[in-house]
Image: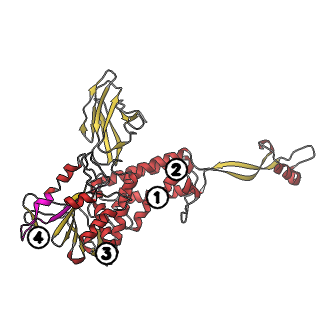
Amino acid sequence: MAPLNSGVNIQVWDDHQKNWVQLNKIYLEEAKIYRWRTRSKESFQLRMQHLSLPMTKTHEGWEGVFETPSQSGMVSFTVSTQEDEDKIENYIYTDHRKLTEKQYQSLLEDLLKEASICFQQSGLETNISASGFIREYSMLQWMYIESTIYKLRNTFQKIEAHPLRNLRKEEVLMRRERVKSVTPRTIAWIERYGESFGATPTKLPSHIQTTKVEETFDVYENRVIFLQLNELESLLKTYRLINDLDIQKKATQYLDWISLWKKAEFLQGLRPLSGRIKITQVFRKHPVYRIWYQWFLSLYQFKTITFDIEQKLSLKDTYLLYEMWCFMQIIRTLRELGQLNDTSELFTKKDGYYFLRLAENKESVIKLNNGGKLIYQKIIQSNTNPYYSYTQRMIPDIVIDFQNQLYVMDPKYRIPANLPMALGEMHKYRDGIVARDEDTRVVNEVYILTPTECYMPSDKDFYDVGFHERYRMGAYCFSPGETNEFFKVWVEKIF
């Protein structure tokens, strides 16, 4: 790491490594408290996202703590002294207690996959594009790049440290004084062709053909890496043209990385692969090249489905992505049960294209059999029909409306430590939403959807089917990569 202009070196305590780590290299997670220190004794100011952090003076320098927000994405620290200022950037990763990075990517893939199926079933026939992007590019692809580019950078650094290479043998003719070793093959050549180069019984020829062994990085996998770097560079240049300052800035930063990577020693003199990429044993089994190959494999999956979400979905809003994913998983469950009737309202048309219509505070309605509806972000207030709220404006995340009964589901990516308190909030839906015609309560059951099961020390099991049947409320675990059999049984009972 280059010396900072301010001369203030910030170190953070890493609970995993049990060691102090540089601020720009520490692995940060959501909603976690970190201790920091510096040996510098001069006065300075430390800010995180432009907010000043408290600090305490010690005999050795300064120390303090900071807490990461309940969001994932880029975070910037600023160290300011009277003479100079340094900006340090890092990345806050998804809370591993809630979702792993692999599960996070699974959210994106599952959401797009189910959207594609719904679009095909809706009977709509039109081009599919991404809002504000040319074809084959989408906001979800950008989110994938943004959330995993640091993983790709670390992978490239490992490849650069130990790239694949092989020994290339070549028969060359060189002056005899430059020949370093004589093999039986060399002796055989001298006996056969030596006279042509002045050989006599007492004198060696002036030139001798020998085998030259040269180490080279010109292997198939390295040529693939070169090709993929060029393709990623082309992608990022496209995203840099998007009318979004944040995306433009980050795309420019990533392009600088790519430019630097292409100057790596092992790529010099190579030609990028031309033609179709095939998976080799190296890409299957090599611990580092395999990760590189899988990263690009996932990147190109977004090309096959170019739906986009109408609003810009920031990477940091993990909770919003989880809400959308839960909604699409419920659609999948209803589809498997044969309950979907019309999914066309899940899409909105703009400039001749259809887009996936999922956004906060905008109702998205799926029509079900027998007059039922599945609604995302349903708005209920004093002047809405056929249901209204006599207390406050309510926007339950997911609602099943069937035979004048509502079933409310509230995805909670980050649930409070006290699950009963979170469920207590659901009573506002049970009691505060009524039918306008009869002034009767219409919310039959309410449930929280969580990525992990959070058991209480008491004997209450809010995930238990018996608890659900007795109290008509509770929680279901919706985790990427896992089946929702208990939830499917419950939905089947409704219909």
Nearer to us: label 2 or label 1: 2
Nearer to us: label 2 or label 4: 4
Nearer to us: label 1 or label 3: 3
Q: Which residue is mark 1?
A: 296
Amino acid type shown at disc 2? Val
Q: Is residue 1 left or right of residue 114?
A: right
Q: Quadrant of the N terminus?
A: top left
User: Are the residues at dot 1 and dot 3 in contact (C-beta closer than 8 Å)?
Assistant: no
What is the secondary structure assignment of the residue under circle 4? loop
Amino acid type shown at disc 3? Gly
Q: Which residue is mark 2?
A: 288
Residue 312 seen: no
Q: Nearer the viewer, residue 167 or 107?
A: 107
Residue 292 seen: yes
What is the secondary structure assignment of the residue under circle 1? helix
Q: Quadrant of the C terminus?
A: bottom left
Tell me which corner region of the image, top left, top right, bottom left or bottom right, holds residue 465. Answer: bottom left
Nearer to us: label 2 or label 3: 3
Q: Which residue is mark 3?
A: 338
Image coords of residue 481 (percent x, y): 39, 59
Q: CA distance from mark 2 to mark 4?
A: 58 Å
Amino acid type shown at disc 1? Phe
Q: CA distance from mark 3 to mark 4?
A: 26 Å
Image coords of residue 198 (percent x, y): 88, 49
Question: Would residue 441 be counted in the magenta stretch?
Answer: yes
Segment colored magenta:
428-450
The numbered mark at residue 267 is none
The numbered mark at residue 386 is 4
Q: CA distance from mark 2 to mark 3?
A: 44 Å
